[in-house]
Amino acid sequence: MTTTPERAPRVKNSKEGRLAFWLVLPAMLVLTIIIGYPVIAAIIRSLFGDTIATAPPFVGLANYVSALWGQNSAEFWDATGTTYFFTVVTVILETAIGFAMALVMNKAFRGRGLIRASVLIPWAIPTAVTAVLWKWAFDPAGIINAVTGSSVVWTGAEWSSRFAIIVADTWKTAPFIALLILAGLQIIPEEVYEASRIDGANAWQRFRLITLPLVKPALLVAILFRMLDALRMYDLPQILTHGANGTTTLSILVVRATLSELKPGYGGALSTLTFILIFVTAYLFVRLLGANAVSGQEKP
C-alpha cells in the first residue's frame, strides 16, 4: 500500500498532533489540579452554612441569595462597584503612561539600557512593600503634604483614599504595561517608517496609521493582563486603608467574610461570584476586542 502525496502531510500532522497532546497533557493535569480543585472546593463549601460548633448544614443557594439580593447585597454591590472603579481608572492611566514610557524606551539614545532597567524597578518591588511606602508618603506628616504644603489626611476620606490607592497602583504597574507594549513596538520593521517618511507622513500620521495598528495585539494583551490583576486588587487598599472609606474591593470582602467573620460558606459564595465576574469580564473583553485584533492581523 502506497501513501499518496496528498495524504502524507495529513499523516505527519496527525502524528505531530498526538505528540503535542501527550507533551501538553502533564501540564494540563497539573493546572487542572492547581486551578480546578480550589474553585470546586469553594463552590461546594458555598452551598453549606457557617455554623462552627456543629457540622455545617446544607443551605443550597442561600449564601448567593444573601450576597446578591439579601441582607448582605449592599456591601457586595458596593465592593463590586469599587473594584470596577479602580480597574477602569487604573488601567486607563497605566495604559496611557505605559504607552508613553514604551515609546521613549523604544528610541535609540545613549543610556537606553539604564533607563529601561530603572523604569522597571517599581514593578519589581512587592505590592505589599509598595503599599507601605505609599502609606508613609500619604501620611499626614509624610512627603506628599511636605512637598505640597498641605495638611490633608489622605486616607481619612473616600475620594482622597481612592486617589492614594490609584496613585500607588499606577506607579507600580505602569512599567509592566510599558514592558509589554515595548515588546510589540520592537517587532515593527523600521522600513515601514522609512517608507512612510518618504511618502511625506508626519509623526502623528506614523503613530496613528502604523504604530497603533501594529502594536494593537500587544496592547490588548497588556490591558487584559492588567485588567485581570486589577479586578483581584487586595494588597494596596488593605494596607493603605484597610478597606475603609469606600475602598473595600471584592477580594477584601472575601477575606473579611472568610477569616475575620468566620463565614467560610458565605466567603465561598463571594469568591465564586468574584470568579464569575472576572471570567465574564475577560471573556467579553477577548470577544469584543481581542478577536477583532487577531482577525485584523490575519488580513493581507
Image (cartoon, helix red, strand yellow):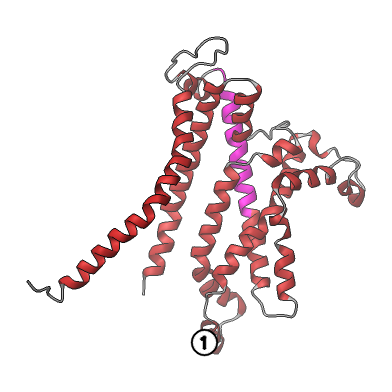
Residue 76 is one of the magenta-drawn residues = yes
The prevailing secondary structure element of the residues shown in magenta is: helix
User: Looking at this rendering, what residue extends furthest in the left direction?
Assistant: 1
* Quadrant of the snapshot with the C terminus: bottom left
Residue 289 falls in which quadrant of the image?
Answer: bottom left
Q: Residue at x 45, y 46 (%)?
A: 31
Number of residues whose C-alpha sits closer than 10 Å to that of mark 1, classed few (under 14), some (14–19) or many (20 or more): few
Q: Is 32 left, or right, of 67 in this rendering?
A: left
Q: Amino acid at mark 1?
A: Ala
Residue 120 falls in which quadrant of the image?
Answer: bottom right
Horizontal and vertical percent position of residue 231? 57, 42
Q: Is residue 141 above or below residue 110?
A: above
Horizontal and vertical percent position of residue 92? 62, 53
Q: Residue at x 16, y 70 (%)?
A: 7
Q: Is residue 189 above or below residue 119?
A: below
43 or 107, which is in the foreground?
A: 43
Q: Residue at x 47, y 21 (%)?
A: 65
Q: Which residues are magenta?
A: 71-92
Q: Is residue 12 above or below residue 291?
A: below
Horizontal and vertical percent position of residue 137? 84, 46
* Quadrant of the snapshot with the N terminus: bottom left
Horizontal and vertical percent position of residue 123? 69, 56
Mark 1 lies on residue:
195
Q: Is residue 238 above or below residue 285?
A: above
Q: Is 156 left, or right, of 231 in this rendering?
A: right
Q: Residue at x 52, y 21 (%)?
A: 265
- Judged from the image, the secondary structure of the residue bearing numbered disc 1 is helix
